[in-house]
Amino acid sequence: MADHKVLFDIAKEPVVVPTGTLLSEAAAQAGIEINQPCGGQGRCGRCAVCVESGEVRRRSALRLSAEDVASGYALACQTVIEGDVVIEVPPQEKIERRLTTDRTVGEVVIPEGYDPQKSQTLRRLNLTLSPPSMDDQTDDWSRLQTAARKEAGIAPLHASLEMLRKMGDVLREGDWKVTAVLNTSTWDDTDSPNQLLSLQPGYADEDQPLWGAAIDIGTTTVSVWLVDLHTGQVRAQVAEYNQQITRGEDVISRIIVAGKEGGTEKMRGLVVDTINGLIEQACKRVKAEPNEIMKATIAGNSTMIHLLLGIPASSIRLSPFVTAVNHIPALSAIDVGLTMHPRAVIDCLPGVASYVGADISAGVLSSGMDDSDDVVLFLDVGTNGETVFGSKDWLVTCACSAGPAFEGAGVLHGMRATKGAIEEVWVNGDTYDPSFRVIGSVKPKGLCGSGLISLLAEMFLTGVVDKGGSINTKLNTPRVRDGDHGSEYVIAWASESATDEDIVITNVDIDNLLRAKAAIYAGFSVLAASVGMPLEAAEKVLIGGSFGKYINVEKAVEIGLLPDVDWDRFQFLGNTSVRGAYMALIDHTLRRRITDIAARMTYIELSADNSFYDAFMSALFLPHTDMSLFPTVAKAIGK
Amino acid sequence: MADHKVLFDIAKEPVVVPTGTLLSEAAAQAGIEINQPCGGQGRCGRCAVCVESGEVRRRSALRLSAEDVASGYALACQTVIEGDVVIEVPPQEKIERRLTTDRTVGEVVIPEGYDPQKSQTLRRLNLTLSPPSMDDQTDDWSRLQTAARKEAGIAPLHASLEMLRKMGDVLREGDWKVTAVLNTSTWDDTDSPNQLLSLQPGYADEDQPLWGAAIDIGTTTVSVWLVDLHTGQVRAQVAEYNQQITRGEDVISRIIVAGKEGGTEKMRGLVVDTINGLIEQACKRVKAEPNEIMKATIAGNSTMIHLLLGIPASSIRLSPFVTAVNHIPALSAIDVGLTMHPRAVIDCLPGVASYVGADISAGVLSSGMDDSDDVVLFLDVGTNGETVFGSKDWLVTCACSAGPAFEGAGVLHGMRATKGAIEEVWVNGDTYDPSFRVIGSVKPKGLCGSGLISLLAEMFLTGVVDKGGSINTKLNTPRVRDGDHGSEYVIAWASESATDEDIVITNVDIDNLLRAKAAIYAGFSVLAASVGMPLEAAEKVLIGGSFGKYINVEKAVEIGLLPDVDWDRFQFLGNTSVRGAYMALIDHTLRRRITDIAARMTYIELSADNSFYDAFMSALFLPHTDMSLFPTVAKAIGK
C-alpha cells in the first residue's frame, strides 16, 4: 500500500498515512481532535471536513447534500485517503450552522417587480387644497375630498368622527397643504373603501417611510416585522415570548385560563403588551414612532387571534370544536389596543378551523404551495401539528393533537428551546455514551424538541431502545437503569448538568414522544388517503414554524415523524406565518390570495375520521410498523 | 226700521235690536262681554262669533278665511243684524286656537302606502341557526351570516368587534335561535352595508316595536320624536330647551363659547345631555328602554350639528364662513354619546352651508317644495332667516343675519315665547290703548317675537309709529313718552305687569325690529331676483320653525316681514326640521332625497351680494319704501 501525505490546514505539519486510512484517523495522528458524537458511524455529520485537493473515497455521505459533496465536503469518519490530500477543518460553529440552517430560506426578499403604488392599499398623499373664499364656501371636508380625487383619483373618502374633529385645524395649520394617509381598499370589497386614516399639516418628505407591521402571534413566540410600505423592505425583525406563556404552555390551557372570571381580558392584555413591547423595540431600532405605524397584518392560530381580540375561545376547546369567527373584519388599532396610530388598519388574517388558523393560511401563502404544480406537503410541527397537503388544484388540511411533547412538555426533563437545552444528541454505537450540543454552549438543563427527536433516533439506531420504544435494560452501560418512572437512559450525569441532577429520558417520556410523532404521521397518512395518493406523491415537504427550523430531517425520518422521501424534497421555511403576514401586508393581491387559500382548504377533522385511529396505531413504532414506508431507515438499521 | 230678536247661546234671554245694529252692540245689550282688543276696527279677529241662523251682513271679514265665513263665522264688530238671529259665542280659547294654529299642518300622518319592509333600512330578524356538529364545524359568525342570507336574503354582514365578542354566548344562550337587528343600507352607498347592530337570545315578539328617534336640535329648543319603525308611527313627541342656551342665545355666541379652552366639549355635553334627557322622557312615556333605540336621524343648523359632534365650529363664524363638514358620515350612538343602543345608527342630515343647515334640507323635504310644480317660498323665521325659493326644477337659498330681535333679544323688554310673554297685541285706534294676550294667561313680563310683530303692526296701523318707525310723540295719550332709550310706548303699566315696571317698546327696539324684518324681506327679494322672478311668483309661502307657527300672517305682512300675497298661499308648517328628520328616519328613499335637496340648493351668500344692501335699505320702512309691493297694507292704511 502506498503512503500519502495528508495536510490539515490547522496543523503545523503534514502526516503520512497509508492508502485506506480514514480521514478521522489521520487527523488524530496529526493531533487534531475531530468531533465524532455518533462514534464514527457516519450518522451525525459533525465530523464534516473539506477536501481542498487530492483523492479520497467517501464510504458514506449520509449527512451531506449533493452540493456539500460537490464543494468537497466529506465525513471524516466515513472517508478514506487514496492520495496526497489537503484538508480544511472548518470551525465547529460553521458545521453546526450548516447542519441546522442550510435548508431554510434566506433573507426576506422583496418580490420581484414589486410596485408599492399598485400593491399597497395604503397611500400617503401630499395634498394641496384650494383655500375657501367668499366665492367658494365649500366645507373643509368636501375640499379635502376634492383634492384627493383630483390629485390621486381617490373618491369617495371616509373619515372617522375624530378625524372630522381635528381636520379643520390641521388644514389651517398647514395653510391648506397637508399629508394624508389613506387606506384605499380592504381585502373585503364590502368594507368602506378609501378611509382617511391620518392628516398632518404640511408635506411629508417622499423618503420618509410609511410604516406597517407584520405580526405573528405564536403560542410561544410573538414576532413583529417592521416594514417600510413605500419600498416593501423589512426594516426590523423582533421576537419575544408571548407573555401569555406564564398562564399555560399550550392553547388548551390558555383557553381554560381565559374562560375564568376576567380571564379573557387578562389574556388579551398579556398578548397586547407583548406586541406593544415588540413594536416599541422595533421602532426604536429604526428611529420611528409607534404612532407612525398605519397598518398591521396579524397571523396566529385561531386561539391566539381570539384571545388577542378578547373573543371568548372556549368553543374552540369543546366538542364540536368551533371558533367564534374565522374571518375577522378590518379593525382599528385603537379597538385592538395596539400602540400604533389609533386608526391604523388591523387585518387579522383568516383561519380555516379551530386548529387550522391564520398562521396556516399565511404559511400556505408563504410556502407558495397553493400555486404549485407539484403536490406539496406542508407542516407546522408543534403542539397541533397542522398539516396541509395539496397543490394549485386542491388543498386538504388537518390538525393532529400531537400534544406538547415536542415542545418539551410531558417529558420529564423536557424544556423549551432556550439556553441550556440540549438540542442535538449523538449516541456512540459501541459505548452507548452520548454527546450533545447545548443551546448557548452552557451546562445542560434539559432537552428541547429537536434534542428529543435526535436522542430518540440515536437511541433507536444504536439499539438503546427497540422498535416499540422500550429501553433495552440489558445493555452493558450504567446509563441504562431503572428509575422512578420505569426504565431510563442517562444523557448527562449530575456532574455535567446545570441542575446538579442526572438528565434522563424515561420509557414514559418515550411513549409520549411516540404518541406525538404517531399523531403527526397519521395526519399525513389520512390527508394523503383522503385524496387517494401515497404520501410519497409529495414532491416537496415544506416545514414551517420556528421549531421546525431546528429539526434534523434525518433524525426526524429515523423516528418516523417525517416521511422517508428524498432529502432534497425537504425545505425548512422558518416562520412561514410571519412571512405570510408580511406578504399580505405589502401586497393586497396576496392578501386576497390568503382569503382564497382559507376558502379552498378542505378541513378534515381527524377526531371524526375512523381511519385516523388505525393510522395512529400503526405509527406508534420506530419508525413505523410498515418498514416499507421507511426504506432508508431500514437500510441504516441493516447496516 | 224693523226690530230683530237676537239670541246668544250663552245668554238666558234674547235681546231685541233694530236692523243695522252691530253684533257686538247686541251682545253688550245682552250682558255678554265680547273681546275687542283692536277697539272694534275689525283687525284683530278676536270678536269672531258663529251665526247659527238668521241674516247678517259682514262689513269686513279681514281676519276670517273663506271657510270660516262658510261655516258662519263673523266678526262681531264688523257684522250688522238684518233679521232674527241665533249666535254662538265660542269660548275664547277656541278662537285663539283657531287664530294661531288654523294654518298649521295637523297631526303626523304616516305616508300612504308606507311599507316598512321596503322603506326601512333597519330590519329585525328572528333567525334560526343550524347548531355546529362534528360534521359541520363552521364558525359561529359564518353560521349567523348564512342564516341571515337564507332567511332574509341579506349578505354579506358586518359586525363590530364588540359584537363578535358577545356573539358566541348569545347564540348558545338562545340555543341557536336569536333576534338580530341589522342596518341593511345607508344613504351613502359606499358605507358598509348590512351591519349587525344587535343580537339577542331567543325570538322577539313580532308586535314589539323597533324604536327609532327623529331629533331636531334647535338653537333654542330640542325636539325628539320616538318612532316605531315597524309601523312608522310617532309614539312620543317631547321637546325641551337646548341646555346650551345658558351659554348664549344665538349660534354666534355659542360658537364663541365653544372656541374657548374646553368649550367644544362643554357645549357638546350640554346638547348631548338635553337629547339624552328627552330620550329618557320619551321612552318612559311608551315604556321602552333607551337601549332599544336602534337608529336616530338628526337635523339642526350647521352650528348645532358641529357642536353636537364636538367638531370645532369657529370657521362658521369667521369669514369666509365655511363649515368643517356638511355631509356627516354614519356614526354610532356610542361615538356621539347618545343613550341609545351603543351601535344605534346616527344619521346627521346634510346641510348646505354655514347658515343653511340640515334643518333647512329637512325642512324643504318636509315642505315638499322640492317636488312641487308651483314655485314656493319657504322660510324659517328666526335668527338666521333661512329662506329657500324654488320648485322641483330649481332651488335657491340664502340666510340673512336677521339677528335675534324676533327671538326677543336686542329688544328692551323682549323675551322668549315662554309663560308671561305677550304674544299678541291689539291697539285701539281711538284711545291708543293696547290689549294683549299673554302666554299662560298670567301678568306679562315682556314681549316675545310674535307679540313684537303684532305690536309693531298695530302701532303702525293706528299711527303710533310712522312709516319710518318713529314713535309719534304728539299723540294724546300718556302711553307715548320720552324714556331713557328715546321715545317709547307703554304696553303695560307697572301695576299690570309681573315685573312691577312698565313694559315698553322704544324707538331703538323698533329700529332693531325693522332691521331684522328688512334683512329677511331683502333675502326674499335677492333670491327672487337671482332667478329673475317677482316674489309674487310664489304660489305658496311656507313658514317653518316653531316660532313661525305663532306668527300672525296679517301682522307680519303689515310690517313688511312677509310678502303681501294672497292669504291662502300661506301655510304654517310648524317644526319642519324634526318632521323632515322623521321622514328620513322611516324611509330611506326620502333620506336620499334630502341628500339630493342639499346638493340641488344653490346657496347665495348675501354678504357677498351687492343687491342685498339695496334691497335691505328699501325694506327698512313700514312696510316698505315701495308701497306697490304691499297693496293690501296700502288699502288698510287708506281705510
Image: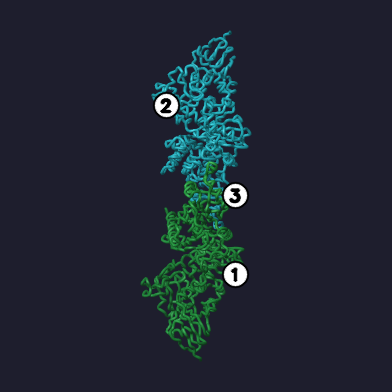
Chain colours: A cyan, B green
Q: Of circles 2 and 3, which is in front?
A: 2
Disc 1 crowd rating (10 Å Cα; few below 14, some 14-19, many 20+) is some
Verify CB contact (< 8 Å) between mark 2 and mark 1.
Answer: no
Judge whether B145 appears above or below A417 on screen. Answer: below
Disc 2 crowd rating (10 Å Cα; few below 14, some 14-19, many 20+) is few
SS at mark 2 in the image: loop
Both labels 1 and 3 in a single chain: no
Q: Quadrant of residue A273?
A: top left
Judge whether B199 appears above or below B407 on screen. Answer: above
Q: Position of residue A31 (x, y in %)?
A: 49, 13
Question: Label 2 lies in what chain?
Answer: A
Judge whether A588 appears above or below A560 on screen. Answer: below
SS at mark 1 in the image: helix
Q: Which residue is mark 2?
A: A485
Q: Position of residue B135 (x, y in %)?
A: 55, 42
Q: Which residue is mark 3?
A: A150
